[in-house]
Image (tube, rainbow, N blue to C red):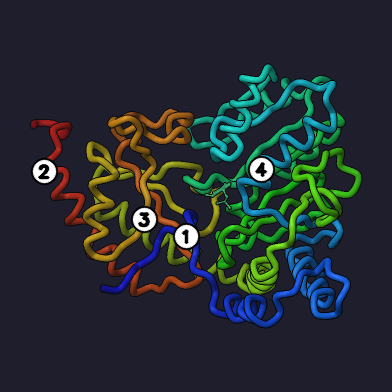
Amino acid sequence: MKTIYFDNNATSKTAEEVLREMEPFFCELYGNPSSMHTFGGQISRYIRKARHQVADLLGCDESEVIFTSGGTESDNAAIKGVLAAIPQRRKIITTRVEHPAVLTTCRELANQGYNVVEISVDKLGRLDMDELEKQVDDNTAIVSIMYANNETGVLFPIEEISELVSSRGVVFHTDAVQVVGKMPLNLSKSKIDLLSLSGHKLHGPKGIGVLYIRKGTRIAPFILGGHQESGKRAGTENVPSIVGIGKACEIAGKYIEDENTRVKYLRDKLENGILQSCPDSRINGDKGNRLPNTTNISFEFIEGESILLLLDKFGICASSGSACTSGSLEPSHVLRAMGVPFTAAHGSIRFSLSRYNSEEEVDFVLEKLPPIIERLRQLSPFVAGK
Ligand code: PLP
């Protein structure tokens, strides 16, 4: 059975060109870039090239690119690194809809005595800018707000937010894991101080990421040991993956237009087709202001997990906005923060596309999904009249 992969916000296929670029760094060019001998020392030039490729996509200086083990590490490092550098400030501002890499970190810091403020969103997932403006004060060490939401694709006005935060002399971090490679960025022209990205969301390898650190940003080293990564993140470099994320960034730059035209067209066709053929379905999130590849759709009165299981029988991969915790199905914290009604939040499905998807795949889903929804509705105890 062919796999139809519409779960690219969870992870994405490693591009073949990326894999080919990485291969020599396992059994041929396996030296340690810190070694004195030529065999090892020559490796540092491939790391420099990768740093250049990442910097090119971000529109920043190579010295501002620090390789990490992924988005989660970058998020943790940004927040904890700034708190360590500015110990006199005890307040952290974030949002209610962040990825757990940020939210869990902040809630743990709250347990340790930090004052953590989570800004709310409205029913379309838009940030409460007035609340943010009121909260940024002299005690704030860092504001960490995601660029785009991984579940709904909703984009926050990051340029506006970074201007505001910077004008108050506070460090601004953004989790751009879902944005890099999908939207053009030019960090040299922005007020973003710290930005996280992850290799496996942009057709690079897993277990590699980047923390962009604007020159002059107050942040303490986050892994101590050797001198690697300007002394900020010690440890022998993961050379194959660094080479891989560099190549993935280079290729991603060339596909940004495709992402915003062809991939967006496929997403819109899928979304409109579903809304037309499935009664009581609705989009979650601000339709006009989203990533081009993501749609989050609620099917009232049925459970997302049941839809996923039936889609899975046809090889269709998507994801649901619920997480199974302690035997009960908890709707996603993002949809709850948006005030999506219980009956709709439980039946939410995220489809996230990529450059590897085709129109035939969209047509296949549009053929298979409506009968699944109809069948589950017939079985649902919540449907009116039952
Ligand atoms: N931040 C966001 C918005 C994400 O979507 C993800 C992954 O799902 C992460 C952070 C974590 O990235 P990684 O899997 O590289 O640790």
Query: Label for residue 318?
Result: 3
Give above or below for 89 relative to 187: above
- The circle drawn on residue 378 is 2
Query: Is residue 362 something that shows in the picture?
Result: yes
Q: Which residue is mark 1?
A: 8
Amino acid on which disc 4 is placed:
Asp
Q: Is residue 168 left or right of residue 123?
A: right
Q: Which residue occupies 59% across, 47% down?
A: 148
Q: Amino acid at mark 2?
A: Gln
Real-space CA distance between mark 3 and mark 4, rounded to the nearest whole angstrom: 25 Å
Place of residue 192 in the rendered image (x, y in percent of width and height, measured from the top left):
78, 45
Q: Earlier in the sequence, mark 4 or mark 1?
A: 1
Which quadrant of the figure contains the C terminus? Answer: top left
Question: Mark on residue 41?
Answer: none
The residues bearing labels 1 and 2 have C-alpha atoms spaced at a distance of 31 Å
Name above or below for residue 314 compared with residue 92. below
User: Residue at the spot x=80%, y=39% of the render?
Assistant: 163
Which amino acid does the dot numbered 1 rest on? Asn
The mark found on residue 75 in the picture is 4
